[in-house]
Image: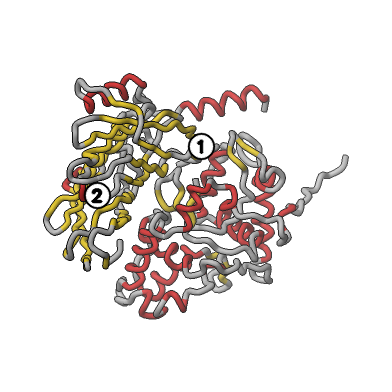
Amino acid sequence: MPTTAKKGEILEIRIIVQHDMESGFRHTETGQRVPRDIIRDFLCVYNGVEVFRVELHPAMGANPLIIFSTVATESGTLEFKWSGDNGYASSTSSKLTVT
Amino acid sequence: MSLTRRVFVISAAAASVLPAVKAFATVDDATQAVGKILGNQKAKAGRVTLEIPPLVENGNLVTMKVAVESPMTQADYVRAIHIVAEGNPLPNVVSFYLSHRAGLAAITTRIRLGDSQRVRAIAQMSDGSFWQGDAATLVTLAACTEV
Amino acid sequence: MSVVVSVVTVSRAASPGAERQSSYALMSADTKAMQDDPLLNPATFAVLDGQALWQESAGKKNRSCATCHGDASTSMKGVAASFPKFNSAKGSLVNLEGQINDCRVTHQEAAPLAFESKPLLSLSTFVATQSKGMPITVERNAANATSLDAGQHLFNQRMGQLNLSCAQCHAERAGQKLAGNPIPQAHPTAYPIYRLEWQAVGSLQRRLRNCLTGVRAEPYALGSKELLELELFLAWRARGMLLETPGVRP
């Protein structure tokens, strides 16, 4: 995503996270089911306010990619949080200067 | 080796690769999932565009784009977009929750499609109304089963 | 009674020519876009992991790849494009993954990484991508001649219960369809690849083992002499073609 923007500009955010998104429908060579292990939620928080949320199901592809938009309202920090099965949690953030 | 024996061995090997569980949901499962989203309301056709390539080389990672016509103001915006697949083992694919802060109701992501099917997108507006769109696609598989 | 001597057929794609084509050309626009944009390319994570491993000290010598090789973008330029090689000191063929392991064992005094393991694939993807856009430089020489001939022989040899050779599909029928999918010429220009079918990054040897399973032949083991010979022949057959690593393939 861009690091600077004009107030009111619509920013496109492209984010991808490394995760196998094991659907729970695959089998090993010996026929055993590989248990489900996916990211279930994604959250984008802009200066403490939730601006975008996603509920992921096993049909989301591996290494989930999400391209979405948000309005540049004020300078600050955008946080991106992922959480899912087996206590998975990961986050990253990006600073934004709005003029 | 006779041709018939060779053919038999091929199909036996192929059969052992099929999973023992129900591979695909029916259109009814998808309808039920959509029903849960809509409650006792109906979704109107329109305003929602769902783009999926009409022919997919591999269903494991299919790029999907959904867009909803909306001014995205505080008074009138898209609250949620739900994607439901009619031919996957589970009908729900992903749900997006937005607000007027989004600016645009347009999202791109990558999904898994287990078979050729129709995929539906249901959008809920801030006024509580539902709109829907869909896309049909053909999903092909690799010619040789892989490990 | 006449004795039939096996005739080695020179495969039509053996000589570099304008009609050679990477399987990239056969993909849908969507998949091509996935390969071209590093943000969309699922193998980017392997490159990043490899970049981190490059800096990580390992083994009794507590050295990293960077200790000897410095900045990979300089030192590894063109390296992946020159493999497989015949290592005369070892008396055997070595591919890129094998070379990485040889370095680990000899210079880092660390245990070799398992074939197809995430760390090994990440390192080989990272190294191979330093040759992206460069031509494959594997040529016939005195050291690799025997192995190259063996690889060519394997390519042309009928195998498996389906009794098919690589050449029958990938040389004679390239461009035609098999079960609705176009048959590629099978040039290893993008390895390691993120194969959508695998939902993971994998090596050429993984792909070759699947080809063998496809013709219902017992697949050669990872790291085997036969797979290395095939890799050598395929690289030589693709000499002059540009490397695309990391590739995305359906």
Relative to C234, residue C1 above or below = above
Let me know if residue C215 appears in the view: yes
Kind of element beneath mark 1:
strand
Relative to C223, residue C196 above or below = above
Q: Nearer the viewer, residue A94 or C12?
A: A94
Residue B55 is labelled as 1
* Residue A75: percent from left, percent from top: 18, 65
Q: Residue at x 69, y 43 (%)?
A: C173
Residue B102 is labelled as 2
* Residue C221: percent from left, percent from top: 50, 50
Quadrant including the N terminus of chain A? bottom left
Q: Callout 2, which amino acid?
A: Ala
Q: Residue at x 24, y 49 (%)?
A: B102
Q: Quadrant of residue A2?
A: bottom left
* Disc nearest the viewer among 2 and 1: 2
| Scheme of colours in the image | secondary structure
Q: Callout 1, which amino acid?
A: Leu
Q: Residue at x 19, y 48 (%)?
A: A83
Q: Nearer the viewer, residue B104 or C102?
A: B104
Q: Quadrant of residue C44?
A: bottom left
Q: Nearer the viewer, residue A16 or C234?
A: A16
| Chain name for mark 2 | B
Please tell me which of labels 2 and 1 falls first in the chain.
1
C173 horizontally vs C243: left or right = right
* Residue C68: percent from left, percent from top: 40, 80
Residue C41 is labelled as none
Q: Residue at x 38, y 43 (%)?
A: B65
Let me know if residue B141 appears in the view: no
Relative to C62, residue B80 above or below = above
